[in-house]
Image (cartoon, helix red, strand yellow):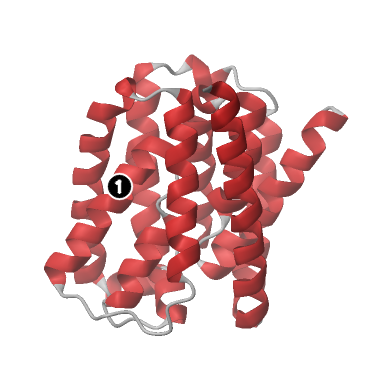
């Protein structure tokens, strides 16, 4: 690993801790670094692989059984969005993908300031999950939208943090598999792949252990600050690419 890769590895570790501990955070922290350093063609399938691993490590299997219905509905919606998103994906330029990633981050940032979300039913959950699946296929960023959907379904932030993991695991895993079928070499030949995987798993395991002890105000503040800088970096890069 070179010095050039060190900031990216730190971002991967920090994002894994956040994702496992809070329910969102991996793509918010890692995607801007990875997309700018490696390009979207390599970054998106690699982000999907690492997100699949961190979500698997963070799954609370008891919660899967206890909330089987909402998880099932969310997975169905997410898969519909993924297949629809992948049908459009080849038509999107790198600049468009960077802009979309920035837009998803901005939506999550704005919603984080809403004190109380309106309640939604099963159809609402499926709709939000579908939008989340589309963002998964396009920019490997479903986290904010999926958590928003769970919160709007009446779940607490603690419940949403746990429930999002099995949904994200299936969504990321399917999207990664479909991207991989198109061009597996983008992942297999990615630089520092083994180090990325090891760092992700280590961060996810730590995040699962400390997640319940992370102060919510600190989490919200740090996530918002990271989101702002990430949006700026992504938009700046998209403008450079035209």
Residue at the (53%, 24%) spot, across then down: 42
Q: Could you tell me residue 204's position as x and y percent?
A: 61, 57
- Please state which of residues 197 and 135 is positioned toward the viewer in this rendering: 135
Residue at the (61%, 56%) spot, across then down: 228
Examine the rendered structure and indicate whether residue 67 appears above or below residue 51.
below
Q: Which type of secondary structure does the marked residue at label 1 adopt?
A: helix
Examine the rendered structure and indicate whether residue 214 appears above or below residue 188.
below
Examine the rendered structure and indicate whether residue 61 appears above or below residue 42.
below
Residue at the (20%, 53%) spot, across then down: 77
Badge 1 is on which residue? 133
Q: Could you tell me residue 206's position as x and y percent?
A: 68, 63
The quarter of the displayed image where residue 163 is located = bottom left
Residue extending farthest to the right is 3
- Please state which of residues 108 and 194 is positioned toward the viewer in this rendering: 108
- Please state which of residues 98 and 161 is positioned toward the viewer in this rendering: 98
Residue extending farthest to the left is 123
- Assign the N terminus to one quadrant of the image: top right
Query: How many circles with numbers are drawn on the protein?
Result: 1
The quarter of the displayed image where residue 159 is located = bottom left
Q: Please say whether residue 214 is visible from this viewpoint.
A: no
Q: Is residue 133 left or right of residue 120?
A: right
Q: Is residue 242 left or right of residue 214?
A: left
Q: Is residue 159 left or right of residue 16?
A: left
Q: Could you tell me residue 59's position as x and y percent?
A: 45, 63
Q: Could you tell me residue 169's position as x and y percent?
A: 40, 51
Residue at the (81%, 38%) spot, across then down: 6
- Please state which of residues 230 and 166 is positioned toward the viewer in this rendering: 230
């Amino acid at each position: 690993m070179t010095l050039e890769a060190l900031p990216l590895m730190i971002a991967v570790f920090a994002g894994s801790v956040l994702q496992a501990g809070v329910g969102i955070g991996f793509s918010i922290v890692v995607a801007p670094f990875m997309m700018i350093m490696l390009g979207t063609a390599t970054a998106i399938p690699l982000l999907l692989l690492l997100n699949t691993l961190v979500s698997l490590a963070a799954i609370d299997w008891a919660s899967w059984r206890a909330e089987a219905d909402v998880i099932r509905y969310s997975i169905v919606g997410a898969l519909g969005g993924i297949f629809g998103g992948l049908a459009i994906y080849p038509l999107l330029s790198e600049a468009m993908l960077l802009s979309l990633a920035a837009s998803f981050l901005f939506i999550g940032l704005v919603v984080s300031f809403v004190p109380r979300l309106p309640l939604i039913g099963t159809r609402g959950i499926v709709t939000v999950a579908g939008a989340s699946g589309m963002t998964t296929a396009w920019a490997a960023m479903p986290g904010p939208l999926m958590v928003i959907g769970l919160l709007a379904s009446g779940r607490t932030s603690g419940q949403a943090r746990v429930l999002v993991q099995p949904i994200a695991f299936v969504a990321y895993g399917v999207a990664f598999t479909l991207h991989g079928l198109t061009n597996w070499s983008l992942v297999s030949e990615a630089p520092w792949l083994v180090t990325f995987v090891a760092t992700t798993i280590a961060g996810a395991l730590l995040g699962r252990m400390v997640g319940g002890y992370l102060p919510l105000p600190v989490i919200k503040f740090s996530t918002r600050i990271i989101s702002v800088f990430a949006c700026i970096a992504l938009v700046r890069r998209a403008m450079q690419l035209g």
